[in-house]
Image (tube, grey):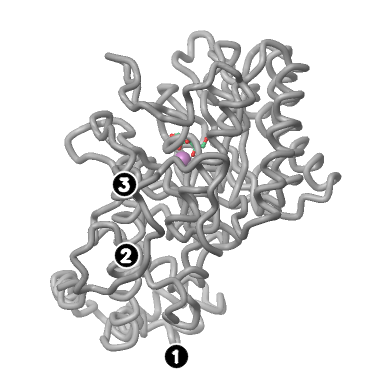
Amino acid sequence: MGVIIGKKEYFKNLLEVKYEGQESDNPLAYRYYDKDRMVLGKTMREHFKFAIAYWHSFVNSGNDPFGPGTKIYPWATSSDVYERAYNKMDAAFEFISKLGLEYFCFHDFDLIDEGVSLKESEERLQKISEYASEKISSSNIKVLWGTANLFSNPRYMNGAATNPDFNVVSYAGAQVKNALDITQKLGGENYVFWGGREGYMSLLNTKMKTEIDNMATFLHMAKDYGRSIGFNGNFFIEPKPMEPSKHQYDYDSATVIGFLKEYGLDKDFKLNIEVNHATLAGHTFDHELQVAANADMLGSIDANRGDYQNGWDTDQFPNNIYEIVESLLVIIRSGGLSGGGINFDAKTRRNSTDLDDLFFSHIGGIDIFARSLLIVEKIINDSDYIKLLDERYSSFDSGIGKKFTDRKLNLNDLAIQAKNNGEPTLKSGKQELLENLINRFIF
Ligand code: XUL
Ligand code: CO
């Protein structure tokens, strides 16, 4: 594809990042991500579908509750809203192409600032999506997913689809309609709902059942509208247990799956699982992936990592090889992601203020996934891991155990079996053996 430069080159001293192999000491090269390399039946690029998150890398300039942004983005300097948006998009396409990637994810108002009225916002979205369309059609860069920001504007302080005020719910509806229109116009492969402020702070002022019923009604409308305009991609829900609300309705994978099934949304919706959201929910990332995979709803991933000492969503770039190896084992063993990919929902630290920091962070994240995939390939092909796991459950493969699996026994049959068999012999779970096995392939 080559590098895509707009009116101006923003990352001037940074060239296209290439695969140079494990021995390379070039910090601006991939040491593991060799996109066309075949691993377990697919190329690396097909396994991952890496995407950049427009908001973290091109919009937020590093502000936190204690101070303003620190990053001086050369694409954000114009006082004209359109020029600023076009420049930002040029910078994004240059960046994605220099990393050799093919996807991005966006919220509506990442692309261009929200207007003062719905009408003005619509005009702005119309223009910037025209510009995006042109850039997409003259490149091989695509939209992994689009979404609407239903949490930043003060109107959403009490929620969007779950707001106690119908006027806010309908405003959110208008915004989702527009976001679906642009996602479809840009050929977006999926559409995400992260329940920004869909939750509550105090039950004293909250009718929880009404709010959750309303959220389901709203999602049905969005799904019906999407299908009516020809959007055939997946809808994803992204679970998160807390922050910004104290209680978020989309707490974790299990909660979301239960909700989708209860309200008849499970045919159109799958899950977008984020690492740091999993750990905030008190789970591991691989646990959340496995729960989604069990329900055939493992759609996409927001890649990042949390901080063991901090209890909030730090959105750091992934670098924990254990976390990613164990997670890829789940993903690969369950047949891969359905329709989605790996979106780096991660930000450089507030004091990482150079433009090349955006490169280092993404290169690191991409390489940790690529390296983990190569490790998983070895674990699957060259070790006894799958065999050991299967053996642990082999008592269900034949005889009376198989009858249990096939639901051909009743409780009385179990009691007879137990009496005949006597006290079961203890069988070790062999956790340390398996941990050593994984380590053998990591190092
Ligand atoms: C917030 C979060 C969002 C969603 C998209 O924690 O993860 O960025 O991914 O709205
Ligand atoms: Co996310």
Classify mark 1: residues with Cα within 10 Å, few (<14), some (14-19) or many (20+): few
Which quadrant would residue 181 be assigned to in this image? top right
The reply to whether residue 320 is in sight is yes
Q: From the image, state whether disc 1 or disc 2 is nearer to you.
A: 2
Q: Report the residue at 50% width, 55% height from top.
A: 97
The amino acid sitting under disc 2 is Tyr
Residue 193: which disc? none
Q: Is residue 361 left or right of residue 49?
A: left
> Which of the two residues, 408 or 107, is positioned nearer the viewer here?
107
- Residue 408 place in picture, x, y as percent: 56, 79
Instruction: Quote the CA–CA distance across marks 1 and 2.
Output: 51 Å
Q: Is residue 32 left or right of residue 172?
A: left
Number of residue marks: 3
The amino acid sitting under disc 3 is Phe
Which quadrant would residue 437 be assigned to in this image? bottom left
For marks 1 and 3, the one nearer the N-term is 3
Residue 399: which disc? 1
For marks 3 and 2, the one nearer the N-term is 2
Q: Report the residue at 25% width, 80% height from top.
A: 422
Residue 317: which disc? 3
Q: From the image, state whether disc 3 or disc 2 is nearer to you.
A: 2
Residue receiving disc 2: 30
For marks 1 and 2, the one nearer the N-term is 2
- Residue 37 place in picture, x, y as percent: 42, 79
Classify mark 2: residues with Cα within 10 Å, few (<14), some (14-19) or many (20+): many
Local SS, label 1: helix
